[in-house]
Image (cartoon, helix red, strand yellow):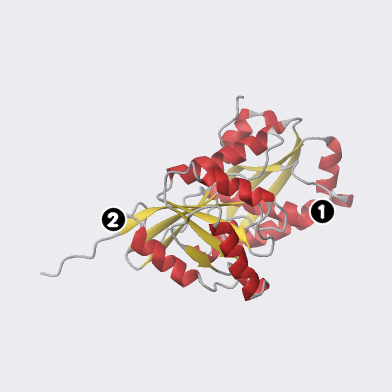
């Protein structure tokens, strides 16, 4: 009798500075877009989990908020969540943007990695945008600050180097049964995923005018008899002036945001979606514990 192959399963935390490419990498490895990706920093707020199968291993990627010096309560919650995810994982992967190189901020993160009591490997991203000599020097400089388990060089955008990285994870994660069905690519509830899609479209449309003052919640998701979905979302802002920016002249801006979000949602759920967006002013929503629970973040009490 041929024994069944032994499966492996575990959590891999992706940590790094804002805009290191964590979300792009996870989307590449999972094979589907499940994490918000924009050119703005700190767009990932809550923990996003993406699930991939490599050989007989189920790899659960944890895309964390970028680590930076917090200035607001929301910042504190995001950074605390990132470090907590790193410490709870089976493997921690530290991403560095090859274009940005070894900055003081990166050096501070490396220093704090010494408190993470799990194996930490280095992954240098965006290797297709810098010369080989620059990559080698960057790798050497980083290794002088910390001893990493392994080092990988990849392009999250085009997938270069990702197969070797996946093979390493598949052979290193602990033996155990799969935690999710084999066809599942995320543990994020569809309501939250839908809110993330709309939030991304807001960022892409208004990246100069509305920095981080908006938050999106899916209030209602109703599957209709005709096979479509009726989705109602609220966009929270802190001031009346921000509400006017999102709505735009004659409603043009919110219509464009809604159209772009609806199109992506239709592709995501593979069914027609009727999307209804509402904008509400909620002053200091960044100090409201309920908003943090909705984002899957711990509310900082200090």
Left/right of residue 273 with respect to residue 26 in the rendered view? right
Front residue of 119/48: it is: 119
Quarter of image, res 291: top right
Q: Which residue is farthest left?
A: 1
Residue that protrudes farthest toward the front in the picture: 144
**Badge 1: how crowded within 10 Å, few (<14), some, or many (20+)?**
some
Q: Position of residue 264 (x, y in %)?
A: 63, 61
Q: Does residue 1 lie above or below 184 as drawn? A: below
Query: What residue is disc 2 on?
Result: 175
Q: Residue at x 51, y 59 (%)?
A: 122
Residue occupied by mark 1: 253
Element marked by disc 2: loop
Residue 127 location, quadrant? bottom right
**Closer-to-camera residue (123/294):** 123
- Dividing the picture into quarters, in which one does residue 155 lie? bottom right
Place of residue 188 in the rendered image (x, y in percent of width and height, measured from the top left): 51, 49
Mark 1 touches mark 2? (CB < 8 Å)? no
Q: Residue at x 23, y 65 (%)?
A: 5
Is 292 situated above or below 66? above
Marks 1 and 2, how far apart in space?
A: 50 Å
* Residue count near mark 2 (Cα–Cα under 10 Å), binned few <14, some 14–19, many ≥20: some
Q: Position of residue 94 (x, y in %)?
A: 53, 55
What residue is shown at x 57% (from left), y 63% (from top)?
Answer: 140
| Image quadrant occupied by the C terminus | top right
Let me know if residue 267 appears in the view. Answer: no
Residue 231's tag is none
Q: Is residue 68 left or right of residue 162?
A: right
Residue 129 in sight here? yes
Q: Residue at x 67, y 52 (%)?
A: 198
Q: Quadrant of the N terminus?
A: bottom left
Q: Nearer the viewer, mark 1 or mark 2?
A: 2
Q: Horizontal and vertical percent for residue 56?
A: 32, 65
């Amino acid at each position: 009798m041929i024994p069944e192959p032994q499966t492996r399963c575990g959590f891999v935390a992706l940590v790094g500075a804002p805009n290191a490419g964590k979300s792009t990498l996870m989307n590449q490895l999972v094979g589907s877009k499940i994490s918000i990706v924009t050119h703005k920093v700190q767009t990932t707020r809550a923990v996003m989990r993406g699930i991939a199968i490599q050989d007989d291993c189920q790899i659960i990627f944890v895309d964390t908020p970028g680590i930076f010096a917090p200035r607001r309560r929301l910042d504190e919650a995001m950074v605390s969540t990132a470090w907590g995810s790193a410490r709870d994982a089976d493997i921690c992967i530290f991403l560095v943007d090859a274009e940005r190189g070894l900055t003081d901020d990166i050096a501070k993160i490396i220093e704090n990695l010494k408190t993470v009591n799990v194996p930490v490997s280095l992954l240098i991203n965006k290797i297709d945008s810098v010369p080989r000599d620059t990559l080698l020097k960057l790798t050497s400089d980083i290794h002088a600050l910390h001893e990493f388990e392994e080092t990988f060089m990849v392009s999250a955008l085009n997938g270069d180097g990702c197969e070797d990285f996946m093979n390493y994870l598949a052979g290193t994660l602990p033996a155990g049964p799969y935690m999710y069905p084999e066809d599942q690519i995320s543990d994020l509830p569809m309501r939250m995923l839908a809110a993330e899609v709309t939030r991304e479209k807001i960022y892409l449309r208004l990246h100069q005018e509305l920095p981080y003052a908006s938050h999106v919640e899916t209030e209602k998701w109703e599957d209709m008899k005709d096979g479509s979905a009726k989705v109602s979302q609220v966009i929270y802002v802190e001031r009346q002036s921000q509400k006017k920016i999102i709505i735009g002249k004659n409603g043009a801006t919110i219509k464009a945001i809604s159209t772009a979000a609806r199109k992506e949602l239709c592709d995501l759920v593979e069914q027609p979606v009727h999307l209804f967006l509402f904008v509400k002013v909620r002053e200091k929503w960044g100090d409201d514990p309920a908003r943090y629970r909705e984002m899957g973040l711990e509310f900082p009490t200090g």
